[in-house]
Image (spheres, helix red, strand yellow):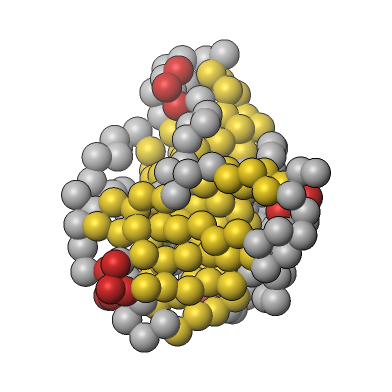
Amino acid sequence: EVQLVQSGAEVRKPGESLKISCKGSGYSFTSFWIAWVRQMPGKGLEYMGIIYPGNSDTRYSPSFQGQVTISVDKSISTAYLQWSSLKASDTAMYYCARHVTSSTWFDPWGQGTLVTVSS
Amino acid sequence: QSVLTQPPSVSAAPGQKVTISCSGSSSNIGNNYVSWYQQLPGTAPKLLIYDNNKRPSGIPDRFSGSKSGTSATLGITELQTGDEADYYCGTWDSSPYVFGTGTKVTVL
């Protein structure tokens, strides 16, 4: 079974750093892109960026460029999303999702990681 | 702010049909396939329709998709209480992927 399993919920203070993870299994991890999607409380889905584990090619949505860093460790089939200095406005659910090259869809999705930033 | 516009909500009685529109432009829907995602309350999104009108394995044929020009439509027939969810369209817009504004389906 193709599966993406994300790390657990996190609570941080403004200004702190954070790295959340997304581990793929059941498929060739290096052959599919991994995207990150934000969903703020009560809001819709926002595409943040995408990485190709095979060569670490990374592309960011203009809205998130410079705000987060997407990385990967293909030796453990895991993608990461990290912040160097969190803001309260980063409070959201974050999903990872697998993407097939040249397609227009994401499948499957991870279960989500809730990030809460509060003083 | 999303560039794909959906109605905020639609509703119908069990057994009825609903349609959800997704309006875009030539830079997104007009030049790319469209996918649809279902997000049940408290869960992660799930792929419902891809390449405008194809259903992944396990998705019932009560769900259908279509595209014309710069708009796409999701149809749900024989509506069930388990279909109550948020639905999002999505496609590429040049480089960034874009999702629709989302539509809440309520079964009356």
Residue B100 coordinates in the image, percent (x, y): 62, 53
Q: Quadrant of the C terminus of chain A?
A: top right
**Would you say residue B67 is visible in this rendering?**
no
Residue A40 coordinates in the image, percent (x, y): 68, 46
Q: Is residue B27 left or right of residue B65?
A: right
Viewer-proximal residue, A44 or A50? Answer: A50
In the figure, residue A79 lies in which quadrant?
bottom left
**Residue under the image location 66 percent in, 32 percent down:** B9
**Residue under the image location 68 percent in, 75 percent down:** A65
Residue A5 coordinates in the image, percent (x, y): 36, 50
Residue A86 coordinates in the image, percent (x, y): 72, 59
Q: Is residue B85 left or right of residue A100?
A: right
**A50 in relation to B17, above or below:** below
**Residue under the image location 42 percent in, 22 percent down:** B82
Marks counted in the figure total 0
**Residue under the image location 44 percent in, 49 percent down:** A7
**A106 in relation to B60, above or below:** below
In the figure, residue B70 lies in which quadrant?
bottom right
Viewer-proximal residue, B15 or B100? Answer: B100
**Would you say residue A78 is visible in this rendering?**
yes
